[in-house]
Image (cartoon, rainbow, N blue to C red):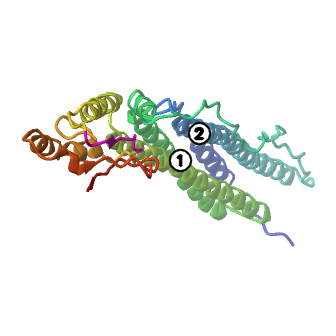
């Protein structure tokens, strides 16, 4: 024989608590803009936006499911109360109690397709260091990202609060509705609370990823020189090389080729291209020795073998 022990008023109160959990706060409208107009920043912002849209959509679906669970509990409590009134009237009148027709919410649960992330529309990658520097330093920066992360993390906190309230409601329900149906209802509310907790963890994970991306960008922008530095470096290197080429040292042939640098060398006033500075260092002393009447015929220019690419080589041979 089935055992049923239920407090209809307590069940109705629990239904109100479940409904209140849905109304704590709606998912925020979060704008995640690229920190810079480079392809990587654009793609990352596009991915973050898709993830945030998924969080908003699933939060809305979870809210609809929460409303459905609350309505079912409220209807169950009302049904028990009405059935108890019918049974009481029948017993007082001396007739057999009649079962009432079950009336529960008929609206279906919403469906949501799996989230997808479309390929972001990005342009061609920059072709030079100066182009990269221009993109990095012309962007909006990470301020907007950090503000978005705060909003997302706040939403994660709200989702955790919903999970706590639902778990408390399930605990109350198991004591107020002792039957197979009551245990099933408590299990469904507990399951919904666990889902909210998992959803909160996903929101917090997105907030952490957004913050990390913003921090990484700020470090990268600090390490990358502004674009005007690249123009200055090229100009000062060119002037130094022209001075070396025009030096009045006829017997010596200087073979100067453009070297490809890794980008770690700095070009600032007084400390320009490392190779041209190295070539210029002996220029003064050599010129003074030759101008003082040294035997210039003792020096012979060596034109072979040619210097390898990406090297700056100066050769001379004493006879």
Find residue 186 and report its image quarter.
Answer: bottom right
Looking at the image, which residue is at 45% across and 30% down? 131
Find residue 111 and report its image quarter.
Answer: top right
Looking at the image, which residue is at 27% across and 46% down? 274
Residue 255 versus residue 165 in the image, above or below: above
The reply, left or right, for residue 232 in relation to residue 192 is left
SS at badge 2 = helix
Quadrant of image for the C terminus = bottom left
Q: 188 or 142, which is in the foreground? A: 142
Q: 301 or 3, which is in the foreground? A: 301
In space, the residues marked 1 and 2 are separated at their CA atoms by: 8 Å
Is there any visible trace of residue 66 in the rendered image? yes
The reply, left or right, for residue 62 in relation to residue 287 is right
Q: 160 or 15, which is in the foreground? A: 160
List x then y, in percent, for residue 219.
35, 45
Quadrant of image for the N terminus = bottom right
Name the main secondary structure of what is drawn in magenta: loop
SS at badge 1 = helix
Residue that badge 1 annotates:
206
Q: Residues within 10 Å of mark 2 (few under 14, many from 20)?
A: many
Residue that badge 2 annotates:
52
Using the image, tell me which numbered label, if any, was put on residue 311.
none
List x then y, in percent, for residue 61.
70, 40
Furthest residue toward left: 292
List x then y, in percent, for residue 309.
46, 47
List x then y, in percent, for residue 134.
41, 29
Residue 122 versus residue 75 in the image, above or below: above
Q: Which residue range is magenta in the image? A: 251-260
Residue 96 magenta-drawn?
no
Q: Earlier in the sequence, mark 1 or mark 2?
A: 2
Q: Given contact means CB atoms under 8 Å apart, are the residues at marks 1 and 2 in contact? A: yes
């Amino acid at each position: 024989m089935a055992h049923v022990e239920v407090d209809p008023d307590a069940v109705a109160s629990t239904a109100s608590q479940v409904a209140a959990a849905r109304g704590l706060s709606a998912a925020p409208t979060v704008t995640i803009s690229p920190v810079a107009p480079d392809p990587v920043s654009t793609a990352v912002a596009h991915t973050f936006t898709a993830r945030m849209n998924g969080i908003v959509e699933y939060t809305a679906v979870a809210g609809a499911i929460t409303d459905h669970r609350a309505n079912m509990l409220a209807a169950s409590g009302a049904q028990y109360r009405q059935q108890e009134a019918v049974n009481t009237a029948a017993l007082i009148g001396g007739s057999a109690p009649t079962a009432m027709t079950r009336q529960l919410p008929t609206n279906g649960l919403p469906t949501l397709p799996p989230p997808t992330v479309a390929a972001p529309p990005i342009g061609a990658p920059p072709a030079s260091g100066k182009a990269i520097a221009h993109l990095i330093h012309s962007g909006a920066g990470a301020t907007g990202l950090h503000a978005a992360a705060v909003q997302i993390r706040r939403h994660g906190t709200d989702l955790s609060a919903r999970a706590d309230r639902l778990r408390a409601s399930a605990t109350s329900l198991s004591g107020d509705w002792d039957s197979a149906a009551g245990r099933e209802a408590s299990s469904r509310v507990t399951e919904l609370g666990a889902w909210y907790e998992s959803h909160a963890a996903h929101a917090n994970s997105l907030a952490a990823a957004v913050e990390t991306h913003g921090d990484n960008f700020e470090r990268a922008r600090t390490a990358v020189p502004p674009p005007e530095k690249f123009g200055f470096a090229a100009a000062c290197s060119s002037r130094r090389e022209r001075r070396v080429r025009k030096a009045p040292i006829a017997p010596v042939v200087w073979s100067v080729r453009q070297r490809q640098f890794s980008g770690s060398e700095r070009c600032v006033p007084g400390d320009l291209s490392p190779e041209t500075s190295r070539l210029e260092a002996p220029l003064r002393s050599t010129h003074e020795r030759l101008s003082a009447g040294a035997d210039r015929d003792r020096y012979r220019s060596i034109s072979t073998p040619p210097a390898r690419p990406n090297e700056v080589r100066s050769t001379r041979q004493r006879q």
